[in-house]
Image (tube, rainbow, N blue to C red):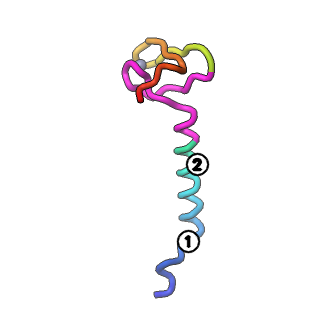
């Protein structure tokens, strides 16, 4: 019963990878302010949403 609290290193690695992936995804992607599609975050200027074809900019964010 002494192994209950010990976590296998593989699980820690996977959890770390998932956390980093989520963090990276949140930093680099946003939702389209028009249709809610996941789109790339704008660093500068405007981008066009592939789903609805409308443009969005850095300032246009839904929450
Ligand atoms: Zn859209």
Which residue is nearer to you in this view: 27 or 18?
27
The answer to whether residue 51 is above or below residue 2 is above
Q: Residue at x 54, y 51 (%)?
A: 19
Work out which quarter of the rendered image holds the C terminus and state it.
Answer: top left
Task: Give the residue pinned by disc 1.
Answer: 8
Q: Earlier in the sequence, mark 1 or mark 2?
A: 1
Q: Mark 1 touching mark 2, by CB under 8 A? A: no
Q: Residues within 10 Å of mark 2 (few under 14, many from 20)?
A: few
In this view, the residue farthest toward the left is 35
Q: Residue at x 40, y 15 (%)?
A: 52
Q: Position of residue 44 (x, y in %)?
A: 62, 18
Q: Where in the image, quadrant-wise, is ligand 1 located?
A: top left
Q: Position of residue 15 (x, y in %)?
A: 53, 58
Q: What is the CA distance from the residue labelled 1 to the residue labelled 2?
A: 19 Å
The answer to whether residue 14 is above or below residue 5 is above
Q: Position of residue 29 (x, y in %)?
A: 52, 31
In this view, the residue farthest toward the right is 44
Residue 32 lies in what quarter of the image? top left
The answer to whether residue 34 is above or below residue 19 is above
Q: Residues within 10 Å of mark 1 (few under 14, many from 20)?
A: few
Q: Position of residue 14 (x, y in %)?
A: 55, 58
**SS under mark 1:** loop
Magenta highlight on residue 5:
no
Q: Residue at x 56, y 45 (%)?
A: 21
Task: Give the residue pinned by disc 2.
Answer: 20
Which mark identifies residue 46? Answer: none
Which residue is nearer to you in this view: 57 or 49?
57
> Which range of residues does the magenta coloring cover?
24-43
Mark 1 or 2, which is nearer the eye?
Answer: 2
**SS under mark 2:** helix
Which residue is nearer to you in this view: 60 or 37?
60
């Amino acid at each position: 019963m002494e192994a209950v609290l010990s976590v296998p290193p593989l699980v820690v690695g996977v959890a770390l990878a998932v956390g980093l992936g989520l963090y990276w995804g949140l930093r680099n992607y946003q939702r389209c302010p028009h249709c809610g599609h996941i789109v790339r975050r704008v660093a500068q200027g405007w981008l066009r949403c592939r789903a609805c074809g409308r443009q969005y900019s850095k300032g246009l964010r839904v929450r």
